[in-house]
Image: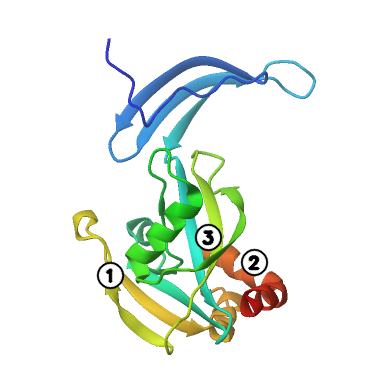
Amino acid sequence: MKARPLKAPPVPPHPLYRPESDEVVWSGRFALQIVRFRYLRSDGTPSRSLTWELWRRGQGVALLPYDPWTKRVALIEQFRLPALAAGEEPVMRECPAGLLNVGEDPAEAALRETEEETGFVPDRLAPIGEYLLMQGGCDEKMHYFCGRVRLPEPGLIGVRGLEEEGEETRILVLPLAEVAGMLARNEIRNVTTAMLLMWLQLNLTRLDREWMDA
């Protein structure tokens, strides 16, 4: 019997979940399962049999580098094939982000990804929360953070990325007010970066007070 890929474990049991079949149909970089199941409705009766594709991406992290002394943030730009497939501009403006290694602490992963993609090393972290990105078809759960850094003058700072992953990230330092304008005009087109920037705007006064006093 063929061993089940580690990246596609069975869906955990739950009182509402009635599994019927579970097949791993792809186990490349990420796994894809075809799951046939029923669930219990609010009145206690079972649903009809459903067949769903389940994309297994696991857990990830994203961090917004913020300089409270100069009111600047650091973002990256990189090519995204799915954005192009969706009819969007493929070079997306984003926060540093990545996937957790097995057993890795989310805060440590956020620091690792930020250093790999920008070269900046935050000295303080503010946890934002944990969120599902595509609960209708994917198990990916993201851990969001804001990190305190001292940022240089605004502009294109350089290019980084892991060569073995075919990655190229252009590092941008921008005034927060300028990025807030982009957000208001719907020019930030990915939900993670938009959400982290919204969080920063909501928590700016408190964060400045805590981080500038330390």
Q: As rendered, which of 24 and 119 lies closer to the eye?
A: 119
Amino acid identity at mark 2: Trp
Q: Are marks 3 and 2 in contact (CB under 8 Å)?
A: no
Residue 157 point in image, percent of width and height = 34, 82
Looking at the image, which residue is at 58% across and 19% down? 13
Figure check: 106 above or below 203? above
Amino acid identity at mark 1: Arg
Q: Distance between the residues labelled 3 and 2?
A: 11 Å
Classify the position of the C terminus by image quarter: bottom right
Residue placed under numbered mark 3 in the picture: 192
Q: How far apart are marks 3 and 1 (CA)?
A: 20 Å
Q: Indicate the secondary structure of the residue bearing disc 2.
A: helix
Residue 188 visible somewhere in the drawing? no
Residue 198 point in image, percent of width and height = 63, 69
Looking at the image, which residue is at 50% across and 54% down? 107
Q: Distance between the residues labelled 2 and 1?
A: 26 Å
Residue 10 point in image, percent of width and height = 46, 22
Judge from the rendering whether residue 33 lies leftward or rightward of residue 182; answer left or right.
left
Residue placed under numbered mark 1 in the picture: 160
Residue placed under numbered mark 2 in the picture: 199
